[in-house]
Image (tube, grey):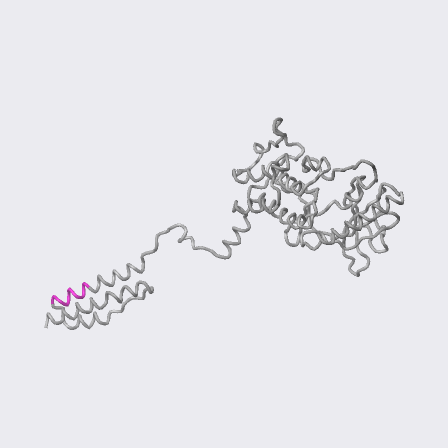
Amino acid sequence: MLPLPSNSVLGCRYRILRSLGDGGFGQTFLAEDLKYPFQPQCVVKRLLPQSQNPSLLEITRRLFQKEIEVLKELGKHDRIPELLDSFEENGEFYLVQQYIDGEDLEGKIVGLNESETIYLIREVLEILEFVHGKSVIHRDIKPSNVIRRRHDDKLVVIDFGAVKQINSPSVIPSKKSVSVAVGTPGYMPSEQAGGRPRYNSDIYATGMLGIYALTGIQPGEIPRDENTGELIWRESVRCPLSQQFEAVLKKMVRDHFSLRYQTVTEVLKDLKDLNEIPRTVVRESDSDPIPPTVISDPHPLPSEELTLQDWLKKSILWIFLLITGGGSIIVLSFMSFKLPQASPVTATRGLYLLPRVVQGVQEGCCGTS
């Protein structure tokens, strides 16, 4: 497949700016839409069928239309690129999708700690939960297919393999069914490599994304146990790792699909139970701050109780002076003494005690007369 030169115009509308990628099944370009005055950027995916045989071309065309409908549904999610257009030109098929301004995660997630890795995995799984709900398997979750959107820092999953699917040799009629593996070695589990992907094949790939973030080792370079076939990665983790999160990751990347998590919802539940999502903690502390004194000292401050005690001590002193002959001036001084302000609880206690004090004062007055 020959590359499209820059400034080529497709469909009398999309001007090619530069190549974004070139694979065995198609090419991807950054383009601008000439239909609008401000010429917004978009992504154009080009498919060149393997054969121009009329019957095979018709099969490819039908599959292409089917995939268009799927991509339209997926594009309703705010973290999946929207399908903007599709067309056929000179025996080639084109998809036009929303351009996501941001950077992919390739080489940018190595060295994450546990909490950051949990958050990363959770973001990807939330998108996959929607995708699987539309009866679609992504098949190629990896760092270069996950973009951190610039304007809101959200993750966006791209490249749903539509071009790869419709260009697969399995569309060629034959007596024997042919299955073609779509995916990336290391991120692709054994059943997917055999051409039989399942929903939890995406879970496996997402788990490998997390292991790559924690270890910095490319998934294809991680050794396996010779007896069980399971990955040996724990010793390569660069940061403290809890046993609980380790167990979740191990279950996500079990070699046999039957031993893995069966649904994304199950994984999300276990991640939620870990209660280690850093942004959730920040939001809670920001919205409901707790004074440090309450956290550091669980005992209540006794200021109000001491105020009442001081008042009682002073009252007893005045009573003693009154009984011993302090005279009417002292009585007047005591009656003008102002009860200090207190909380409702302290004030209530004061009301219970005050009649007894007054009664004592009155008895003292009578006794001295």
Horizontal and vertical percent position of residue 311? 25, 63
Horizontal and vertical percent position of residue 123? 62, 48
Quarter where residue 245 is shown: top right
Quadrant in which the C terminus is drawn: bottom left
Q: Note whether 184 is above or below 63 in the view shown.
A: above
Seen from the viewer's position, the closer of residues 46 and 313 is 46
Residue 92 is left or right of residue 283, and the answer is right
Please identify the residue farthest to the front as the structure is shown.
175
Quadrant in which the N terminus is drawn: top right
Classified by dominant secondary structure, the portion drawn in magenta counts as helix
Horizontal and vertical percent position of residue 304? 31, 60
The stretch in magenta equals 316-324
* Number of disc labels: 0
Q: Note whether 94 is above or below 187 in the view shown.
A: below
Seen from the viewer's position, the closer of residues 360 and 173 is 173
Q: Note whether 224 is above or below 245 in the view shown.
A: above
Residue 252 is left or right of residue 67, and the answer is left
The structure residue drawn at horizontal position 83% and vertical position 48%, both measured from the top left corner, is 61
